[in-house]
Image (spheres, rainbow, N blue to C red):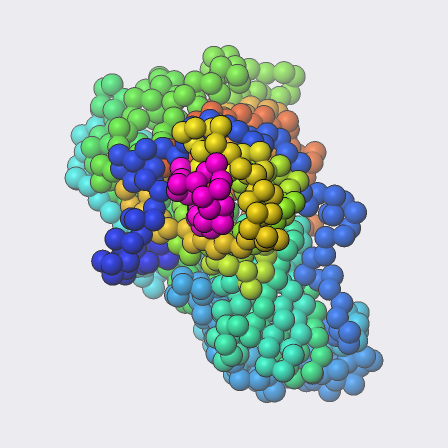
Amino acid sequence: MSILGDAAAAVKGAAQGVMAKAIEVAPESWLPGGKPDPLIREQHGAIGKPVSRVDGPLKVRGEARFAAEFAPDGLSYAALVFSTVPKGRVASLELVAAQSAPGVILVMSHENAPRMAPMPRFMSANKAAGGDDLPVMQDDRVHWNGQPIALVLADSQEQADHAASLIVATYETEEAVTSLADAEARGTEPGEFQGEPLKLSKGDAEQALAEAAFKVDEHYSTPRHNHNPIEPHAVTVAWDGDSLRVHDATQAVTHTAWSLANVFGIDEEQVRVTSPYVGGGFGSKTLWQHQILASAAAKLAHRPVRLALSREGVYRTVGGRSPTEQRVAIGADADGKFTAILHTGSTLMSPHSALPEPFIVATRSLYAAQSFFLDTEVARMDMLANTFMRAPGEAVGTVALECAIDELADKMGMDPIELRRRNEPDSDPQGGTPFSMRNLPEAYRVGAERFGWSDRPVPGTRREGEWLIGMGCATSTYPYNRMPGGAARITLSRDGARVEIAAHEMGMGTATAHAMVAADRLGLDVEQVKLDYGDSAMPGVVLAGGSQQTASIGAAVMAAQQALFADLLKLAGNDSPLAGLGADEVEGADAGMRSIAEPDRFESYASILSRAQRDEVVADGEGPPPLESQKWSMHSYGAMFCEVKVNSVTGETRVSRFLASMDCGRILNAKTAASQFRGGVIMGLGLALMEETQFDERNGRIMNPSLAEYHLPVHLDVPPIEVIWLDIPDPHAPMGAHGVGEIGITGTGAAVANAIYNATGKRVRDLPITLDKLL
Ligand code: MOS
């Protein structure tokens, strides 16, 4: 999910004094002309090594407890009943059979649910976490097909599920907008994202296109997608008086706590949300109705409640990615220099959702062009609120843009990598802001050589028996983000350090990477650092989204480490070899501090603590506001290479090889980063070839709410994916590192589509590229 809205608002809204203070505390390296942090110039400590997950053994042994695995005394189990109409009101609810079924504790509906405020909708406030801002069981209104209309609480899950099946609802339906054509006929509006309109123009792009020596002008479409984390959404809640304890599976503990407090009209401090392990989030693990309904039912029943959504429940109540209809037109002069880039089209939102799938965002900064016209128009539909899904915008936007580039290169008879190279911008094409880091041509050079790009066949000419073989490439890109509000606490004792930060581990490797970062900054071994996270009671307001958690945590840990060093130097006093040095003149090494200028001046933490007769020192630090993103155009890049085999008889596509050559700054952990890239690519293969939510336009109902009917890549669908990276640090980012969570899905869809064209000579511009479209 994106957080720049927060960042932009925070920076814009900040008073002068605050800004001055922010500049004071921001590391110089993050500001123009500043000198780079000496710690990011080279690799040291465990940074960059393939360190195995610190949470791995717990997960393998089944000891990592997920949200639906807590069993407080008196636990009860909830099941939901979903509306079967898209709009109207519940006319009657037949509850008696359910109420008298075995084990049933209560049935909750709008008739008896406690009074609650709507969820604060994501991005409407700093800590808002809600997927929408609709009332939750406060009246008889139905807003989408699948909305929860009743909840059954019972002594076992089976009893709850059975009783829920006995509930009969009747409806008074109202006319609903459930088809794309209908929605668009009612008019569209330009989308707004992160406080800025998703519509911009530079020069007269249509005119330049008309006059261009070479041009492409095509339409591309991507379907609706649903979230399928391996762990379906779940929550275990218990009230203690007016205090609410929540074991959640979330990528935003602090946001969830604040938002739940708002819903129930209690103080933020009265809600504690923990979420130490999450089985995948991808943008979907925020606040949806199930956490609220579970908490409401727990309140009514005076019992702890577990609400684990079924897979169908996730489809009914947790939003996904909206479909897009995109036009990309590119004009080029005789040398292939772009004279115009147009990227326009439409997407869908519900009347209460937070995100217009911003498919034009990558196009703003990827290529130089004399003129631009970019526009994401939004139509409204009566449906479950759409939401963030891994690289919202870029994932589907790069499909259209990067296929169009390939099509133009083909028309010009030019290698598509060469066409891209000729349109490398020197600075951000929209405002001229310098790039903090951009090594995309080098990523292509290294990747092309490794992949054997020079062997790419003429389209439709390479064959092995029934199989046509082809290669394609595409650019991958995702912005560098950092969120304001990052904070960390370090407790240093004789045998190591404990770092606390309200951060998240959804399987990405955060806990491992940041134990490594803290160890590196403190001069400790990774085993000597304990990273505690996933608890709203801990410092910081950092969500896991927008691929920004790494930078935000890193900045917070650096600030806490500076505060800790200042305290330690004070404690060390005049008898220390470090006497007279400031916190920025020392670095962590060998379980102590040493002078950066004179490395022989050293004192161990143990020695400082002993002399001061202290067992531990605790320091808090806050990451400075993300000013670097105001000063630099900051992005990550990758060159994606794909080889496919397409069966000439059946139309079946098999991806046979994939290479991702990444430019994402310093890589902190070679093992977990490779897994992140690879996971993104796999999701991109699903986007290209399989994933599609079947949506019944007559009644707004999702027709394939199960993993049997919604196709995702499984092991047999996924070829060896090779991942390499340049490892060139970004001098303007904490640790020199960029996030690696989302970028892998970008560019991948286009690389597959371009490879399919190369194999078959057929362009398919409508995803997923299923076999019927190739026959
Ligand atoms: Mo994400 S879609 O930033 O979790």
Q: Is residue 103 visible?
A: yes
**Most extreme residue toward the top, as rendered?**
455
Say above or below: 401 vs 612: above
Q: Is residue 710 visible?
A: no
Residue ID at (62%, 68%)? 246
Residue ID at (70%, 73%)? 305
As drawn, is 271 to the left or to the right of 328?
Answer: right
Say above or below: 758 vs 302: above
**Image coordinates for residue 559, horizontal then vertical, percent:** 44, 48
Which picture quadrant has residue 296? bottom right
Residue ID at (49%, 49%)? 571
Say above or below: 82 vs 611: below
Q: How many marks?
A: 0
* Residue in front for this viewpoint, 130 or 481: 481
**Image coordinates for residue 388, horizontal then vertical, percent:** 48, 53
As drawn, is 563 to the left or to the right of 527?
Answer: left
**Most extreme residue toward the front, as rendered?**
575
As drawn, is 667 to the left or to the right of 413?
Answer: right
Which residues are the magenta region?
Answer: 556-585
The C terminus, quarter of image: top right
580 inside magenta stretch: yes
* Residue in front for this viewpoint, 601 or 126: 601
* Residue in front for this viewpoint, 280 or 347: 280
**Image coordinates for residue 771, horizontal then vertical, percent:** 59, 35
**Image coordinates for residue 669, horizontal then vertical, percent:** 57, 34
668 inside magenta stretch: no
Which picture quadrant has residue 315? bottom right
Say above or below: 499 vs 699: above
**Most extreme residue toward the right, as rendered?**
102
Examine the residues drawn in magenta and state their main secondary structure: helix
